Amino acid sequence: MIELKNLSKTFNANGKDVKAVDAVSLTVNEGEICVFLGPSGCGKSTTLKMINRLITPTSGQVFINGEDTSGLDEVTLRRHIGYVIQQIGLFPNMTIEENITVVPRLLGWDKQRCHDRARELMHMIKLEPKQYLQRYPRELSGGQQQRIGVIRALAADAPVLLMDEPFGAVDPINREMIQNEFFEMQRALNKTVIMVSHDIDEAIKLGDKIAIFRAGKLLQLDHPDTLLAHPADDFVSNFVGQDSTLKRLLLVRAEDAADNAPSVSPQTPVGEALELLDEHDRRYVVVTDGQNKALGYVRRRDMHRQQGTCADFLRPFNATASHDEHLRILLSRMYEFNRAWLPVLDAEQVFLGEVTQESIAAYLSSGRSRGMKTSIVSPAEVAAS
């Protein structure tokens, strides 16, 4: 866990004191990724660098896993914090393996342990160790070098990782690939990460929390969906963009936007099913077994003036929604299969409800959001500052 308490930095410029960071307080819990966003000069990179004391705070405190880091010497502190920068900073005279294991070797790891760790991390970024470990940085592409820079910061298994625009200099194709690899690694390694970015889409994709900075102040700290649904003020709203509702499609899961829907069993008589459809003004109803697992659906028009049970008119689903898929995927699937609705199923095929184009629109327009608000500075407080 990383906790900042009233962290501030004042620089002297041309004989005048300039407050680059103004009393920033926030908490990033263990295993979370928090992305710092804001315009150039807003204080996000300065705040990041005060955590590992590349910049010395003027006032305030930094706690890592409950320990006040002001009592640690800088070298000890930095060896226990991974650090990734946009410029990568690989040592040109060292092999890739030597670059990856710089900090572990400084910490006294033996040769075999270092080698095993390098191989493990290379596999995580899908680079064959035998092919790449003995090469030098100049023999790798820019995207490959950036991936090495990321895993080098993870080599000593530090619990905290700081990243200063780590993917900013990479072309769009490699950027998305590295983002995906990093996200997979984070889920496996469960590091506590603070990342500086200028890209709202990257922040939404990777962040558990997003912190918006302006003129040295922290304006809003929230789950990405909450940030998009409830911006603290006009500045935050303009910064995240006018298409914030569409951006939310990547964050909201099927089960969040699903409506409760009735179901019937295969043994339900046609007459009862038609009464249920009339009662709910529906054209179809999902059929489930005794464990509420979805078997298919029946349509009103197929059963009209017919006898028998729902089993006689059961139709298979040609498209479904997994409970954890985001809405952008679901809308794409609806258009692909020309469907106005999709049943939402969990991993065991249990029927959880249904997503319709109307339920998606209703969810997004309602202002509901997945994340709980963690810290919001009100517009009045911003205006008064």
Image (cartoon, rainbow, N blue to C red):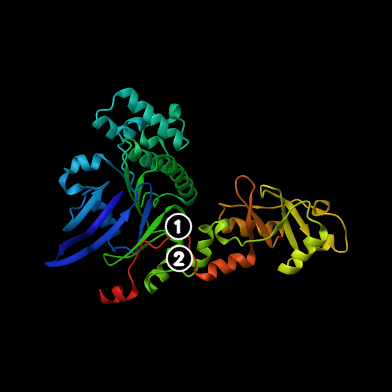
Q: In this rendering, is residue 184 above or below 136?
A: below
* Sequence-wise first label, 2 or 1: 1
- The disc labelled 2 sits on which kind of residue? Leu
**Residue 111 image point, x, y percent:** 31, 23
What residue is shown with label 1?
A: 204
Tell whether 258 sits left or right of 373: right
Q: Are marks 2 and 1 in contact (CB under 8 Å)?
A: yes
Q: Residues within 10 Å of mark 2 (few under 14, many from 20)?
A: many
In percent of width and height, residue 293 lies at 67, 48
Instruction: Name the residue nearer the viewer: 339 or 367.
Output: 367
> Residue placed at 36% from the left, 26% from the top?
115
In the rendered image, which residue does mark 2 sit on? Answer: 228
Disc 1: CA contacts within 10 A as few (<14), some (14-19) or many (>=20): many
Where disc 2 sits, the SS reads helix
- Whole-Å distance between the Cαs marked 2 and 1? 9 Å
Closest to the observer, 171 or 182:
182
Q: Residue at x 48, y 36 (%)?
A: 126
Above/below status of 346 relative to 274: above
